[in-house]
């Protein structure tokens, strides 16, 4: 029950190297990040099936990283850290971690923790709740009833995701739909404009509901809405 892919975020290079090697021998693809910001600027930071997170990191703090990941993914997340302050366990679990292991810890124990969390996640069998695009009101309705006001460009983007039925929508398709140029001279400007539009839409959804935002990037391809989406 080990995940296929895992992000290991830990600035102890020797520890991370040997742990990554151990997990790779178990059949897990592991990417190691010594700085939390390195993960966040990765082409697909929220595409991993599992995360192992240290708390004392360069870049943003480990607890803040957990909170950010939890806004983008429901993947398994285990903290492995030497931080021992009394409030640490409460902080990391409240932030969204599934389990907390204190260093020093054996690699076998880390693997067992990953298996336990991954088994629970895989066995949930929960059907994802539906999101709905209301064309008449120009709103996106979250499963908890929260309503997100959409601009005309936002609505055009959401129509693309409705038509895609959960498949990835290419950047070119999205740019064309919202009227961004796709000529070679304007490629970078168009890409930056699309990324900024997606970012603002995500933030608008995050402010409206505490639910996981299903709108995610797909490395070097485009974007995907990873939840049931209908329109009326």
Image (spheres, helix red, strand yellow):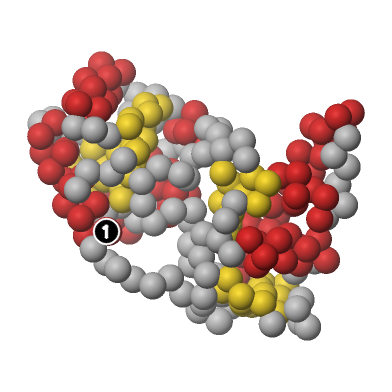
Q: Nearer the viewer, residue 193 or 9?
A: 193
* Residue on which disc 1 sits: 122
Q: As drawn, which residue projects farthest toward the top?
A: 14
Is residue 112 left or right of 71 when viewed as pictured? Answer: left
Is residue 163 left or right of 153 when viewed as pictured? Answer: left
Q: Residue placed at 49% from the left, 53% from the top? A: 72
Confirm whether residue 12 shows in the render: yes
Please say if 40 is above or below 121: above
The image quarter containing residue 201 is bottom right
The image quarter containing residue 189 is top right
**The C terminus lies in which quarter of the figure?**
bottom right
Q: Nearer the viewer, residue 173 or 8?
A: 173
Q: Nearer the viewer, residue 193 or 71?
A: 193
Please say if 74 is above or below 18: below
The image quarter containing residue 192 is top right
At label 1, counting other C-alpha atoms closer than 10 Å, the crowd grade (few under 14, some 14-19, many 20 or more) is few
Q: Residue placed at 34% from the left, 38% from the top? A: 5
Confirm whether residue 86 shows in the render: no
Please say if 209 is above or below 194: below
Q: Residue placed at 83% from the left, 66% from the top? A: 152
Q: Which element carries disc 1, helix, strand or loop? A: helix
């Amino acid at each position: 029950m080990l995940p296929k892919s895992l992000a290991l975020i830990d600035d102890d290079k020797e520890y991370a190297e040997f742990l990554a090697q151990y997990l790779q021998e178990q059949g897990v693809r592991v990417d190691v990040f010594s700085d939390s910001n390195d993960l966040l600027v990765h082409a697909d930071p929220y595409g991993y099936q599992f995360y192992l997170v240290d708390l004392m990191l360069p870049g943003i703090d480990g607890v803040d990283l957990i909170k950010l990941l939890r806004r983008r993914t429901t993947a398994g997340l285990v903290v492995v850290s030497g931080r021992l302050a009394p409030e640490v366990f409460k902080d990391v679990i409240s932030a969204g971690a599934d389990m907390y292991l204190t260093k020093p810890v054996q690699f076998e124990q880390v693997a067992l923790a990953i298996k336990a969390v991954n088994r629970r996640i895989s066995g949930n069998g929960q059907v994802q709740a539906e999101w709905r695009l209301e064309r008449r009101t120009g709103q996106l309705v979250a499963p908890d009833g929260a309503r997100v006001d959409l601009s005309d460009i936002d609505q055009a983007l959401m129509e693309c995701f409705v038509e895609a039925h959960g498949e990835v929508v290419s950047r070119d398709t999205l740019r064309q739909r919202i009227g961004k140029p796709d000529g070679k001279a304007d490629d970078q400007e168009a890409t930056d404009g699309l990324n900024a539009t997606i970012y603002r839409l995500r933030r608008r959804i995050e402010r409206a509901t505490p639910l996981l935002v299903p709108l995610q990037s797909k490395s070097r391809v485009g974007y995907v809405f990873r939840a049931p989406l209908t329109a009326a």
